[in-house]
Amino acid sequence: MRMLKGNHITVRYGEHTVVDDLNFELHEGQWLMLVGPNGAGKSTLIETISQGVPYTGDIMLEGKNVRRYKPAQLASKIGVLAQKNSVGYGYSVEEVVALGRYAYTSGFLSSRDDDGKMQVEKALEATGLTDLRRASVLTLSGGELQRTFLAQVFAQNPQVLILDEPANHLDLVYQKHIFSLIAEWLKAPGRAVMSVVHDLSLARRYGTHAALMNRGKCAAQGKINDVLTPENLRSVYDMDVYAWMQEMLAQWQ
């Protein structure tokens, strides 16, 4: 089932075109990796889908233009995890996770959310944060904080998860943990993931599909192994990516 589709998406800042007439599709069960060099327009595309920047073209969610959704309706269907989250107040982990239920309340600071408590509990358990639920987020490590915001998105219970470098700035243990949590979340029916990833090894390990971007355009799109070919990567990165990866791996053999 097709869950998300972009038609002729274009984003311009003045005379500068950041995303240029780009099309994409995301189907149920897919993890679509947005890959490509810096400045390719990957993060801008993520912002566009979450309605954070003006654009031309159409983004369709379950066959309906996202512009026709009310913000709360859209938030109940699309969850977004930013590259880096900061906090300035000493909320507890549980309080931050519970903010993911805002779209389901009947009004500002309303407590009417029958499913909310269960979803928060499930999100805390899935991310291994149950024992830290009372801890202040100001005391957390970088990995724990990112897991907290991932739990917030899980509590939102969206159908589509949009991620911008979800494990950026995290050490290897937390990178593996975050990506494994997302892969587990994706196993449930009616879900799909799209994420910006710079690390091609992570993209290939966890992605089912990829869109290889360059200068705002899509150079290749499809199944992960059909997109991340030596020829496609060389044309975009202007280097032999495969040889470089093998050279790096050889240091550990």
Image (spheres, rainbow, N blue to C red):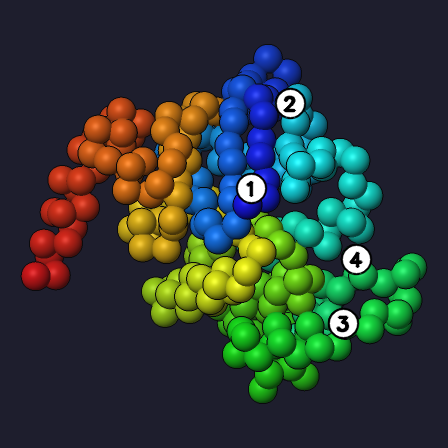
- Residue 224 lies left or right of residue 234; in this view the side is right
Q: Name the kind of residue labelled 3 in the image.
A: Gly
Query: Please, what is the three-letter code of the amino acid marked with disc 2?
Result: Gly
Find disc 4 in the rendering and name its residue.
103
Marks 3/1: CA–CA distance: 27 Å
Q: Which mark is residue 116?
A: 3
Q: Nearer the viewer, mark 3 or mark 1?
A: 1
Residue type for callout 4:
Ala
Instruction: Identify the residue at horizontal 48%, vertical 24% (top origin).
Output: 216
Image location of residue 23, percent across then percent down? 52, 27
> Which mark, by number, is residue 2?
1
Name the residue rendered at 66%, 21% in the picture. 56
Q: Residue at x 51, y 44 (%)?
A: 27
Which is nearer the N-term, disc 2 or disc 4? 2
Locate residue 126, reporting x and y percent.
54, 75
Q: Read off the residue under disc 2.
A: 57
Which badge, 4 or 1, comes first in the chain's sequence?
Answer: 1
Q: Earlier in the sequence, mark 3 or mark 1?
A: 1
